[in-house]
Structures are given as structure tokens and as C-alpha cells.
């Protein structure tokens, strides 16, 4: 008759993941997703101890499933203490049937092309997606249901109520990230939200977006808007989550010190007149900055292509609002602006009160029509704490070498490092200089 204790000891001594050196185990752990860690921890007691369930970030959106998961973590006495970041998914299922059919057909072609490219490493997974693909009717029914649920949430305010509740339940909360691009691209989501993870494997759909994009020949909903004060509520609700975050952070006590935006590479941002003209949202923005001790603020601005009223004719409201953020350490401001010949240079001093940020260590400027001499003059008011400046350039501007002059114009102070963001690729000034100098 076999001895159960002896068998148990023999099993525990068998080579396996639990017997690996702890350093190697940590490397493996760092490469697997939170969902996989959760699944592994449920296989045995040893892995449960080695892989405790961790939720450093939680997701919220207008999708009921995300709200349910968000509240579930907020109610858990252990998990709620681990949360340091809330990611607000702004994407919306708003495609009309004709747009959905067009997107579905385009995706259909891509799926078949990728499934036939046998030389690619991901050929097998695309083949499985092709085999699991749902009919267009089934896909539309799922999509339409999600759209209806989102509209119901926006009417009920369930997402805002959950967000307020979460602020009071997450004692370690530090950062809020707002993104209009959570769904990423076809079968490659940027964030694994509960709603996105629940989508069927073969689900072919129009990738949701939220914010208007500055591109030509798109549907009317994406055309450049008028001023915020003259815009409809339907238009303003493209920034539904952002409006809630600005309002709530200005009204309740919280521990948030970083407000970030993940654009996913899209040319989008916050309507500049929402933050630089008198309106309810501007008041909420000011209250948020006063009520929060933000050390980091990423502020993407949606501006008018080829026009300068958003900068040179600024009312000063944005400047005065940002003057309230006296604890800033990291600040970045990308825009949707595309330089046109003959456009006047942006007056940075009218928009960004760098002299009001005594603790600032990093500032990022992307898509501004401004020369190296203008930036050099602007940086004369920089605090002594500033250590890095990141400038967004087109590849043509970068290769023209004119930005070498910026370091020269900044004088003998070598404590400030320069970086260039060229087509989403970050490059250090010193590397640029060495490579470009004959």
C-alpha cells in the first residue's frame, strides 16, 4: 500500500517552476500578464503563495462590465490597497451600420491576407482567427449591444459614481490615465480591460475611438469643431470621461498626483478652447489644479491646423489655470498642430507659465511651430530644478541640424539634457550631435 505522505514529498521534489531559483522565477513572473498570474496562482497552493493576485491598476469606462470589475476590486479589503493607477477607457462604440460594414470588410481582407502569409511567425494565430471569425450579423449584434450599454451608462452616471467611490477606496492611488485608444488595433488591444477581454476570439469590429481626430476626408463627426462654448452637448461628450475626471478631482479629496493621457499614437487631444475660454469645464480644470497637488501633468491639445488663435491670440485662461499647478515636476504638452509655411511662431510665454513651476524637472513640447531661438528665450525663465527638455520634431526638422543651435543658444548650462521626439522615437541631443557633426 502506497504512503500518501511519501508521494506528496516526492511530488514536491520534482523539478518544476516552484523549484527554480527565486531570481529566475522573478524573471518569468515579470513576463506574464496579470490574468496569467491569476490563473497560475489557482493551480496549486505553492503557486498561490508565490503568485499572489495583484491589481496595481484598474480600468473604468462606460461599459458595465468594467464598472462591475472596478467596484469589485474597490470592495475587496486586500486588492483595493494595491491599486496605484486608474485607467479610464474613453473609447466608444459609435459606428453606424454602414461604417461598421466598411470596417468589417477591410478587417476581413486583412485577416485573410495575414492568415495566408505562412512565412510570418504569427501565421498560426491569424489562421485560428480566420477559422473562428463570426458572421457580420453576429458581430454587429455584439457591437450594437455594447453601444446601447454605453449610452445607458452615460445617462445613469454609473461610471462617475463608481469613479468617486474608487477615489475613496484606493489609499495608494497615485495616477489617473485617460486613453481614447484602449482597443488599439485589430486583435491587438492597448489595454486588457474586462470588456475587451470578454470579446469573442473571432470578433471582427470597427475599432472604437472617442476623440475627434484631425484628419481630412473623415466622417463629419471627426471634422474640426467650432469653439467649445458654441458646441453641442453631443460633441462635448466625446470627452465624457475627461470631463468627469476634471470635475470630480476638483470636488473631492483624493491622493492623485499624476494625470496622464495615453493617445496611442493618434493625433488627438483636448479641445484647446475648453481650457482657454470661459466655460464650465474650464472652471472644473482650475478647481482640479487647485485641489490637487499634481507632480505630473500630460496635457494633449487638439488645435486648429494652420491657425494661430489657439496660441498667439490666447485669452490667457490656460496660462492662469496652469499657474495653479505649483507642484509640477513633469509636464508635457503635445498638440495636433501641423506646421504650414508662413505661420506665425507660437508665443510659449502666453500659454505655459514655466516661471510658476519652481519644482519642474522635465518639460515636453511637441508639434509647436516655434524656432530654437524662441524656445531658448522661453527657457530663460526656467527654474533651477529643470533637468530635461523634450522637443517633438518632424524628421525633416530633425535632420536639418538647426536644433544643434538650441544648445548653443542655451549658453553654458549643461545641466539640462535635450531630447528629440522624432516620429515617436526618443533621441538624446548628444547622440544627435555626435552623429550629425562631420
Image (cartoon, rainbow, N blue to C red):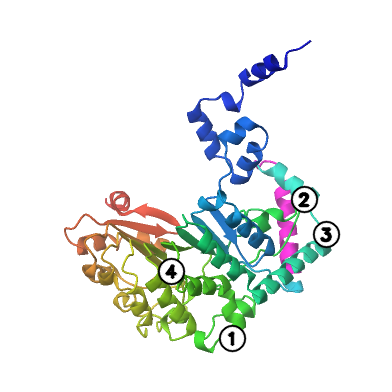
* Front position among marks 2 and 3: 3
Please give the name of the residue rendered at 29% of the width and 76% of the height, measured from the top-left corner: 349
Name the N-terminal-most of marks 3 and 4. 3
Name the N-terminal-most of marks 1 and 4. 1
**Mark 3 nearby-residue class (10 Å; few <14, some 14–19, many ≥20):** few
Mainly helix, strand or loop, the magenta region? helix
Element on which disc 3 rests: loop
Name the N-terminal-most of marks 1 and 3. 3
429 lies left or right of 57: left
Residue 386, by quadrant, is bottom left
- Residues in magenta? 100-121
Residue 204, by quadrant, is bottom right
* Real-space CA distance between mark 1 and mark 3, rounded to the nearest whole angstrom: 36 Å
Q: Is residue 120 magenta?
A: yes
Element on which disc 4 rests: loop
Q: Where in the figure is residue 253, as x and y percent of width and height?
A: 45, 67
* Real-space CA distance between mark 2 and mark 3, rounded to the nearest whole angstrom: 11 Å
* Front position among marks 1 and 2: 1
Between 87 and 347, the residue placed more toward the observer is 87
Using the image, tell me which numbered label, if any, was put on residue 130.
2
* Front position among marks 1 and 3: 1
**Mark 1 nearby-residue class (10 Å; few <14, some 14–19, many ≥20):** few
Q: Which residue is mark 3?
A: 135
Q: Which residue is mark 4?
A: 299
* Real-space CA distance between mark 3 and mark 4, rounded to the nearest whole angstrom: 41 Å
Using the image, tell me which numbered label, if any, was put on residue 232.
1
Amino acid at each position: 500500500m502506497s504512503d500518501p505522505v511519501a508521494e506528496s514529498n516526492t511530488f514536491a521534489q520534482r523539478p518544476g517552476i516552484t523549484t527554480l531559483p527565486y531570481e529566475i522565477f522573478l524573471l518569468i513572473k515579470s513576463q506574464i500578464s496579470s490574468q496569467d498570474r491569476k490563473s497560475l496562482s489557482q493551480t496549486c497552493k505553492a503557486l498561490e503563495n508565490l503568485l499572489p493576485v495583484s491589481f496595481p491598476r484598474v480600468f473604468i469606462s462606460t461599459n458595465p462590465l468594467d464598472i462591475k470589475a472596478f467596484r469589485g476590486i474597490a470592495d475587496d479589503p486586500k486588492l483595493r490597497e494595491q491599486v496605484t493607477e486608474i485607467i479610464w477607457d474613453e473609447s466608444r462604440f459609435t459606428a453606424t451600420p454602414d461604417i461598421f460594414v466598411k470596417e468589417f470588410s477591410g478587417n476581413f481582407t486583412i485577416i485573410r491576407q495575414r492568415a495566408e502569409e505562412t512565412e510570418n511567425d504569427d501565421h498560426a494565430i491569424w489562421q485560428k482567427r480566420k477559422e473562428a471569425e463570426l458572421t457580420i450579423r453576429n458581430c454587429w449584434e455584439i457591437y450594437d449591444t455594447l453601444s446601447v450599454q454605453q449610452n445607458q451608462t452615460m445617462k445613469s452616471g454609473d461610471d462617475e459614481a463608481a469613479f468617486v467611490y474608487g477615489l475613496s477606496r484606493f489609499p495608494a492611488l497615485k495616477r489617473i490615465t485617460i486613453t481614447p485608444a484602449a482597443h488599439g488595433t485589430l486583435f491587438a488591444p492597448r489595454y486588457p480591460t474586462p470588456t475587451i477581454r470578454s470579446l469573442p476570439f473571432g470578433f471582427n469590429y470597427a475599432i472604437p475611438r472617442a476623440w475627434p481626430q484631425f484628419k481630412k476626408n473623415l466622417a463629419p463627426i471627426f471634422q474640426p469643431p467650432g469653439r467649445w462654448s458654441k458646441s453641442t452637448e453631443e460633441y462635448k461628450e466625446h470627452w465624457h470621461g475627461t470631463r468627469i475626471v476634471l470635475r470630480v478631482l476638483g470636488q473631492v479629496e483624493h491622493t492623485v498626483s499624476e494625470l496622464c493621457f495615453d493617445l496611442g499614437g493618434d493625433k488627438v487631444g483636448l479641445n484647446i478652447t475648453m481650457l482657454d475660454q470661459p466655460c464650465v469645464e474650464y472652471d472644473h480644470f482650475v478647481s482640479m489644479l487647485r485641489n490637487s497637488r499634481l507632480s505630473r501633468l500630460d496635457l494633449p491639445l487638439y488645435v486648429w491646423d494652420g491657425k494661430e488663435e489657439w496660441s498667439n491670440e490666447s485669452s490667457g485662461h490656460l496660462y492662469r489655470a496652469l499657474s495653479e499647478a505649483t507642484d509640477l515636476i513633469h509636464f508635457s504638452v503635445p498638440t495636433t498642430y501641423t506646421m504650414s509655411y508662413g505661420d506665425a511662431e507660437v508665443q510659449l510665454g502666453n500659454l505655459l507659465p514655466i516661471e510658476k513651476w519652481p519644482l519642474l524637472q522635465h518639460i515636453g513640447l511637441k508639434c509647436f511651430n516655434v524656432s530654437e531661438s524662441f524656445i531658448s528665450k522661453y527657457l530663460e525663465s526656467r527654474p533651477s530644478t529643470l533637468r530635461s527638455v523634450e522637443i517633438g520634431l518632424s524628421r525633416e526638422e530633425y535632420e536639418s541640424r538647426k536644433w544643434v543651435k538650441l544648445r548653443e543658444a542655451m549658453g553654458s548650462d549643461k545641466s539640462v539634457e535635450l531630447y528629440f521626439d522624432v516620429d515617436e522615437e526618443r533621441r538624446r541631443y548628444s547622440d544627435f550631435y555626435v552623429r550629425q557633426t562631420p
